Image (cartoon, rainbow, N blue to C red):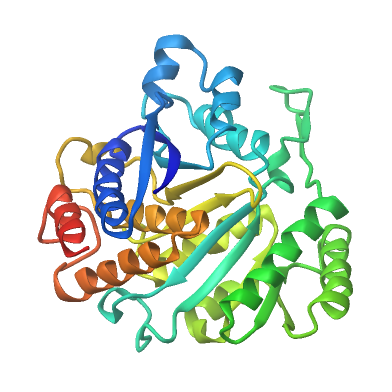
């Protein structure tokens, strides 16, 4: 029997609640498909930071490096200033573990939950590959004359050939494996960001023409991409973009697929520890009420199994989630599903 050691970070707010349901479903899948998951829980989040003053010790990062996968609930605490936990935990792990791909499937399971008129599941089914270790998120920059009328704030976007190329290669190869339209769209802003996206565009066409001739290459400015997400989402197969643009367009993608309650993502190091999470926040106002939607966390677990090579179990989880969304839930928003958090988890696990 194959065994996988999985690190679990429940995190803040409703994070532990949705992780509980994801584990319930993962255990049902592992029992059915003949593999074992060994979980190791880690206390990282706002409560720990308030107790210790340290978001994520380096020693914990080194421990997490040994796991093939990490399941994360949510990070964000109302009593901690914004930015501290995000930089001290999320960005720290993404950078230290070289999770250089953020992978975001955007898939509509039921047209009732798409806010765009007339769009059906076959119209909203694409994937965003976001570079996850560079760009504006490196923290490069600083202040001059901070706190004075002459203050200057500089935030620099760092793009390296190595970082851009490995992201693009992942995206090309993912497009090949997906084998849908075999079209990869580079999302950028070449008409204004003429240094960073010159590098992206040149590399995109160089390696595409040389090494991925079977993949059709396309380009769209980021502002046009957001427009077409709403008007013509069916135009997209796989999209690749930088860190900032990827952060923005994936939230729009979540909305057209039905909202944060169903949106999951992976922070991928193809050769190392990767982290899977629902992309919504910690939703502290719903903590302990048993009303938060756990399906995004369950889908994150499904992505984790697919990454680990348990593709049959992953496919079964997705099929059951689609069935539950289409046949059971009234809404994907917290408190409006028609079922509690635990009931949704039970429903998916028992169906598996």
Q: 249 and 61: which one is in front?
A: 61
- Corner quadrant of residue 193: bottom right
Residue at point 52%, 62% (across, down): 104
* Image side of residue 36 versus residue 230, left or right: left
Q: 279 and 210: which one is in front?
A: 210
Q: Residue 222: in sight, yes or no?
A: no
- The furthest residue to the front: 1
Residue at point 88%, 77% (across, down): 210
**Image height of 199 relative to 214, above or below:** above
* Image side of residue 339 versus residue 352, left or right: left
Q: 161 and 256: which one is in front?
A: 161
Residue 194 spot, x, y in % from top left: 87, 63
Residue 88 spot, x, y in % from top left: 56, 27
- Corner quadrant of residue 133: top right
**Image height of 131 relative to 88, above or below:** below
Residue 6 spot, x, y in % from top left: 43, 39
Quadrant occupied by the C terminus: bottom left
**Image height of 179 relative to 141, above or below:** below
Q: Residue 155: in sight, yes or no?
A: yes
- The furthest residue to the top: 52
Residue 94 spot, x, y in % from top left: 61, 40
The number of callouts visible is 0
**Image height of 23 relative to 11, above or below:** below
* Image side of residue 338 versus residue 31, left or right: left
């Amino acid at each position: 029997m194959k065994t996988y050691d999985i690190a679990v970070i429940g995190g803040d707010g409703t994070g532990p609640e949705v992780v509980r349901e994801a584990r319930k479903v993962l255990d049902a899948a592992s029992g059915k498909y003949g593999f074992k998951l060994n979980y190791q829980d880690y206390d990282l989040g706002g409560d720990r930071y308030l107790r210790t003053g340290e978001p994520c010790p380096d020693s914990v990062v080194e421990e997490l490096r040994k796991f093939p996968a990490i399941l994360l609930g949510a990070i964000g605490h109302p009593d901690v200033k914004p930015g501290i936990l995000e930089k001290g935990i999320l960005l720290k792990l993404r950078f230290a573990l070289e999770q250089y791909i953020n992978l975001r499937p955007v898939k509509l399971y039921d047209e009732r939950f798409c806010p765009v008129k007339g769009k059906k599941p076959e119209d909203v089914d694409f994937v965003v590959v976001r570079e996850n270790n560079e760009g504006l998120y490196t923290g490069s920059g600083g202040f001059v004359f901070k706190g004075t009328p002459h203050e200057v704030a500089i935030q620099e976007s760092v793009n390296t050939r190595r970082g851009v190329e490995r992201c693009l290669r992942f995206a090309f190869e993912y497009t090949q494996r997906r084998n849908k339209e075999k079209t990869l769209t580079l999302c950028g802003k070449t008409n204004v960001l003429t240094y960073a996206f010159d590098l992206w565009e040149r590399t995109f066409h160089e390696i595409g023409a040389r090494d991925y001739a079977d993949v059709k290459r396309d380009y769209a400015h980021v502002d046009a991409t957001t427009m077409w997400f709403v008007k013509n989402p069916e135009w997209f197969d796989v999209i690749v973009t930088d860190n900032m643009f990827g952060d923005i367009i994936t939230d729009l993608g979540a909305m057209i697929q039905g909202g944060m309650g169903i949106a999951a993502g992976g922070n991928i190091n193809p050769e190392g520890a990767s982290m899977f999470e629902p992309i919504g926040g910690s939703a502290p106002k719903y903590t302990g009420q048993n009303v938060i939607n756990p399906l995004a966390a369950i889908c994150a677990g499904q992505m984790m199994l697919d990454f680990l090579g348990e593709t049959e179990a992953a496919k079964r989880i997705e099929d059951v989630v689609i069935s539950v969304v289409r046949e059971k839930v009234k809404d994907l928003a917290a408190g409006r599903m028609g079922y509690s958090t635990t009931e949704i988890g039970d429903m998916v696990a028992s169906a598996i």
